[in-house]
Each structure stands twice: as C-alpha cells, then as structure tokens.
Image: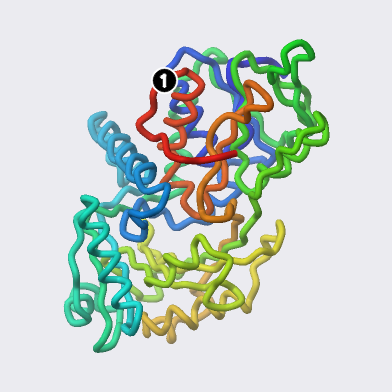
C-alpha cells in the first residue's frame, strides 16, 4: 500500500488536524488510514461543535492546553477570512457566545465561584441574573433563583463541515502523493524494526503501510483496541484506560419553532463530563446549541455501553424531559421533528487526554482520550504532536501521561 514519513490511524478531527499541521509546517508526507469508509465515523460526527471556555475549570491540568487550542482555532478562522472565504459558509463558524446556567440552590454558589476563577484567568465573562438571562434568551426559563454566566467570546462550529474542510485542505496541500487517505482499512497489526524496535508502520486488512518517521494512533474510542494489539504482539503492557462512552445528540428541526440566540449548557454538565458519577443512569445533562441551518442540537447523555451506537428511546426521552425543564417549548415539539445522532467519546479517568510518545516503542505516538472535547482540542493536539516529533518546543504542552 506504499509508504509515507508519517502514518496516522484515525480520520476523525484529531487525525486529520495532525495531518494538516504536518502538511502546513513540514515537508513530510502523510498517510491517514481509517477503518470506516468515511470521515466523522466516531465522536466528531455526533458532536455539537462548541469552541468554548465557559465550561472549563482553570484549576484543571488541561486549562492552558484548552485555551491554547481555542486560540489556534481563532487563528485558523482568521486565515480562512484572510483568504476571502466566509468561515460561516465553510465551517459553520459563529461568534454566538455561550451561557452556563443554573436554576439556583447550591449550584448558584458554585457558578459564582467558577465565574470568579475564569475571570481571574483572563476569560471575559458576565454574570446574568434570571431576568437578564431570560430577556437575552427568551426560550430559557430558569426561575426566580436562576442565574447564568455569559461568555461572549465562545464560538460555535459545524463539526462535520470543519472536518470536511480540513480534509479538502489536506488534499490541496499534499499533491503528487504527499498526502494519502486509505478508508475501509481496519488496522490489524504494527510493524517494528527487529534491530532497534523503531516503529515502521501499520498492517491493515488491505495491506501494509510503511512509515519512515512516525506512527500516530488517533483512533478515538478505538485507540485502546489498537494498543491492545501492540501489547499482545510485542509482549508489552500498553493498553491505556480509554473507554468508549456512548452519547446521544438530538437534532430538533428548525420547523419546530424553537429559537436560541446563544449556545447554552447547564452547570451540572461541568461535573458529569469527566466523572463516572452522573445525574441519572444515562448521564444526562442539558446542552443546547444551534447549527448553521437553524436546527437546535440538544444533548447530551453519557453511558458506558461498549461500542453499541444504537439509538435508545429511553435516553432520548430523558434528554427531552430534562431539557424541557429549562426550555418549556420543547414539551410541544412533535417527535417527528427530532432526529437522534449517536457517537462514542474516548473517555479517560480524570478527563485528561493521552497525547505524546509511547516510550517503549520509539516512533509510536498516541493522541486520544479527549472525551467530548476532541473538536475543541484538535488543533492544540496537532501542535503538540507535530512539535514533539519535529523536536520543537510547543506552546500546547501540559502534564499528561500515556
């Protein structure tokens, strides 16, 4: 099947963004191999597409990394604009701002504390009481004790459109075979030099792919499966604690008449995202955003169900039931106007992605475990991986472990 300087397993937002940075900033050739027959087959295709700081915790290990990645997204969008292309048209980019809200009680104090922390960390934020929040977002009903933090710099993106745009740019940057894609080719093994243990490529159902410089595992929830293959083949204990975490997203057709001005997220989401403990058996916490076509994207759930992505009617009903507490208009939306999407987030304990070299096998790198933040963290991940392989200092480095 040929050879490249870099071979990447995974054609989601992480894998394609890494390929994009190699093509932009180096002279290396890149091949992306994907088990599915298309892009967006994993978590990205079922995501809401928020590029937000509002729900992040400044005390977390990934705060600086997240902020850096968001900065890189803004730089990416500025490049698109400078080329004379509308970012809204190409990747669904919108400067909507976001609301992190609560209906009161102990969460109000927690929201205030979070607001002060993010403001001290340099993020623009405003406190809105219930009246102000409902005036700005009429569909959102919080009650007299409710409140919201408004983050005006937060943005929305169309995840699928963004991945397609990056894929097309990769193809334009890599003519003459410098950039290649291989779809429908599950990885079945790895090639390693018997002399110095250096990784030499991947084995797939359709043949071998040789790598001259690096092999990168960026297969999302399937990354552990690939490392398990490595562990068995080379008698190593490499399998990280990446688990598939099933999520439902509901697309509410714009014809249903629900209108939102901002991206919105209930404060409880910030605790369920990185924890095994959830509000209910389906891990439902309300998020609501709008796509470029005007449809409302309603989430979200978190379940450990293996690799099953079958839509579950009970989960769909629970998402609707909880969201209707904050958006009463949902109660009258016909089910025929609601279309579910499902995907698998790559979960790691503590919510810290695994990014960097696997020291036991020189030439092998891992970029996975982003949970539900793969889109937001993609460009920072690409920067870190490329800078590591090219032996540069990276602005995106944070504490991580494989």
Q: x and y percent of residue 344 in the render?
A: 61, 55
Q: Quadrant of residue 147?
A: bottom left
Residue drawn 50% across the image and 55% down it:
372
**Residue 356 placement, left or right of 92:** right
**Residue 379 placement, left or right of 132:** right
Nearest the eye: 307 or 395: 395
Residue drawn 56% across the image and 52% down it:
43
Judging by the rendered image, the residue that carries numbered circle 1 is: 392
Q: Is residue 1 above or below residue 236?
A: above
**Residue 323 placement, left or right of 123:** right
* Residue, far bottom: 144
Residue drawn 78% across the image and 28% down it:
206
Q: Quadrant of residue 65?
A: top left
Q: Is residue 253 above or below residue 241?
A: below
Nearest the eye: 263 or 348: 348
Nearest the eye: 272 or 253: 272
User: Image quadrant for the C terminus?
Assistant: top right
User: Image quadrant for the N terminus?
Assistant: top right
One can see residue 267 in this view: yes
Residue drawn 52% across the image and 65% down it:
249
């Amino acid at each position: 099947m040929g050879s490249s300087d870099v071979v990447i397993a995974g054609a989601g937002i992480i894998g394609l963004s890494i390929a994009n940075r190699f093509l932009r900033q180096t002279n290396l050739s890149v091949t992306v191999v994907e088990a599915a027959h298309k892009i967006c087959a994993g978590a990205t295709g079922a995501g809401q597409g928020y590029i937000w700081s509002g729900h992040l915790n400044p005390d977390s290990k990934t705060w600086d990394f997240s902020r850096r990645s968001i900065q890189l997204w803004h730089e990416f969008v500025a490049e698109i604009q400078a080329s004379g292309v509308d970012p809204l048209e190409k990747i669904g980019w919108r400067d909507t701002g976001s609301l992190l809200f609560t209906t009161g009680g102990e969460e109000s104090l927690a929201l205030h504390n979070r607001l002060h922390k993010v403001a001290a960390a340099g993020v623009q934020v405003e406190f809105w009481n219930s009246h102000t929040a409902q005036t700005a977002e009429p569909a959102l009903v919080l009650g007299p004790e409710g409140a919201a933090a408004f983050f005006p710099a937060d943005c929305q993106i169309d995840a699928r459109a963004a991945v397609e745009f990056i894929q097309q740019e990769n193809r334009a940057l890599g003519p003459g075979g410098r950039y290649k894609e291989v779809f429908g080719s599950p990885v079945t093994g790895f090639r390693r030099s018997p002399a110095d243990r250096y990784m030499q490529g991947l084995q797939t159902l359709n043949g071998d792919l040789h790598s001259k410089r690096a092999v990168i595992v960026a297969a999302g929830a399937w990354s552990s499966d690939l490392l398990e293959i490595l562990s068995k083949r080379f008698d190593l204990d490499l399998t990280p604690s990446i688990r598939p975490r099933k999520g439902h997203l509901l697309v509410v057709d714009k014809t249903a008449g629900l209108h939102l001005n901002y991206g919105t997220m209930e404060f409880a989401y910030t605790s369920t995202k990185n924890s095994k403990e959830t509000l209910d058996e389906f891990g439902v916490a309300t998020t609501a955003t709008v796509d470029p076509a005007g449809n409302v994207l309603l989430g979200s759930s978190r379940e450990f169900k293996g690799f099953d992505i079958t839509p579950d009617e009970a989960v769909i009903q629970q998402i609707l039931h909880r969201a209707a507490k904050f958006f009463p208009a949902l109660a009258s939306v016909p089910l025929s106007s609601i279309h579910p999407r499902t995907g698998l987030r790559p979960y790691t304990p503590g919510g810290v992605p695994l990014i960097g070299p696997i020291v036991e096998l020189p030439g092998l790198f891992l970029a996975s475990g982003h949970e539900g933040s793969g889109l937001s963290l993609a460009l920072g991940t690409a920067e870190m991986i490329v800078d590591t392989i090219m032996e540069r200092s990276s602005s995106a480095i944070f504490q991580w472990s494989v």
